[in-house]
Amino acid sequence: MISPKLRCLTLIVLNTLAATVLTVPTAVWAAAGDAQAAPAPIRAPAILVLAAVISLGLLLGQVSLFGLTLGSAGVLFVGLVAGHLQLHVPGGTGEIGLAAFVYCVGLGAGPTFFRSLVQDGRSLAMLGAVIVASGATTAWGVGKLLGLPAELAGGVFAGAMTSTPALGALTTAIPDSPDVAVGFGVGYPFGIIGVVAFVQVLPKLLGRELKSSTAGDPSAAATQIVRKLVEIRNPAIVGKRPGGVPMLEAANCQTPRVRDGELLRPTPHDFQFTIGQQVMLVGPEKNLATVMDMLGTEVEGADQLLLDAERQRRHIVVTSPEMVGKSLKELHLLSTYGVTITRIRRYDVEFVPSAMTTIEFGDQLTAVGEPESWPEVERLAGHRPSTLDHSDILSLAIGLLFGIALGMIPVSIGNQSIQLGLAGGPLIVGLILGHFGRLGPIAGHLPRSARMLLMEAGLALFLASAGVSAGGNFVAVLQSQGIWLCVGAAAVAIVPLTVGFLLADFVLKLRLLKSLGAICGGMTSTPGLAAITSATDAAEPVIAYVAAYPIALFLVTILAPILVEMLR
């Protein structure tokens, strides 16, 4: 049976061959006929051009150079080449793709966007906002200093911030200007390389390696959670409950089960440590040795006992508003139901929660407790795994309809009247639906696989259209602006990074890992985050990224058209 990856690769190759057969001979013939002339129009079906641009672009995006890849942005650069060859794609393709893309982005960011503004993520959200504002200010200064066209400067800003939604907002607000996509194409490489280089070089300049920065970090090694059976030997903790031992929470560890003969039973809510007890300790691997030394000694030969206990646990999916938004401390699961949450899987990251961890829609909880309590806990959580796999196409269509309609409503700012457009309208509706989960009959949830597929497909359609439409002027703009355009793009990428770090380090006093994660979120740079997580197992940068990203994404989308108006 052919694997999905092989099938996808086969389709890419076939599309590429088809496009090559149809376009290359004509291009060669035109070049031979008049070498000095601009590229002659190439006749090829628009739908075939679209498929070829997307296929070649995604293939280009997978090419790794010094560990960096273009990703979906490869479609834009192939589109620029196709546009330079005067090829065309079907009309309306970009608009449909953009609306679907930003709507799905909103659905994904909604659960954390508003909460990050009112909880302990406020400082990280503020950091993301300052980074975007400093980027916009720098782009305004560069545009004025170099005398760049407003549309070109706006595109450079969107590219340096690696923000495709901002590019979408600009192309819908200024539909007839190819300079926007040209500026994005110039700024994007500086945005990607700048952030990745910054998060890799800065720790070395400061003499603080990322791996050593995880010392004492309770989120460290969040994806390497292990279980050990420990015999209590420390008289200092005798008579105390697990919550009364600060080191357990500081190390992000729990004791969800206690040994009773040949069984490991759920820890009762009134449990107290006594000498000789054997408890199951769950937590990040890097922290477990220290905690075991504090509690007592590891019990050897307990693998089968631990395995049997693992088979008795329960996986619960959260879909109910009764649990969403509340901390584990507020839910009183242990005292009310005798249930302990030992792990949470969120955003494909598994971690051990603390008492203050807030539950979010779609969280997958690993619970340990009394079997008779499962029905009540599942009812409280709204445990319906099928909910996460169900795609409500009607809700998707209605959400897009309201988003597109909202984007067409004019908004007055001073003497100017602007529209949120196909980028802003669907984004706001997606954020609201993603936050509430459901508004009346409209569901605000798409399965992650469906949402990611629609996002990637929409993004590819939009970038192909934007690239092809701008390709005709790309070379001319670069020739007219010269090297200073690249210098300006580099400044727009570097200044926000510097401002963000100074604010995080000297004003907010954030740990290095949290600072770098939030800076990547403020720059909306997933490659930057990937560079951090490849160097450390800590979950702290991921959590900081999630807190800063939504507000940065929203602001960069809104500020991009405003920046262009200010430069005109």
Image (tube, rainbow, N blue to C red):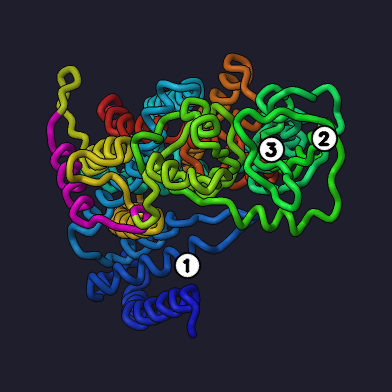
User: Would residue 96 appear left or right of 110 to someone viewing this image?
Assistant: left
Residue 455 seen:
no
Magenta region includes residue 396: yes
Amino acid marked by disc 2 = Ile
Give the position of the C terminus as an image quadrant.
Answer: top left
Q: Which residue is mark 2?
A: 232
Q: Which element carries disc 1, helix, strand or loop? A: helix
Task: Say the numbered circle drawn on residue 255.
Answer: 3
x, y percent for residue 150:
30, 33
User: Would residue 396 appear left or right of 345 to someone viewing this image?
Assistant: left
Marks 2,3: beta carbons within 8 A: no
**Residue farthest toward the top in the current orientation of the protein:** 507
Q: Residue at x 40, y 35 (%)?
A: 323
Q: Which residue is mark 1?
A: 59
Distance between the alpha carbons at the discs numbered 1 and 2 = 56 Å
Distance between the alpha carbons at the discs numbered 2 and 3 = 12 Å
Q: Which element carries disc 2, helix, strand or loop? A: strand
Figure label count = 3
Give 495 or 422, whichever is nearer the viewer. Answer: 422
Quarter holding residue 82 = bottom left
Q: Which element carries disc 3, helix, strand or loop? A: strand
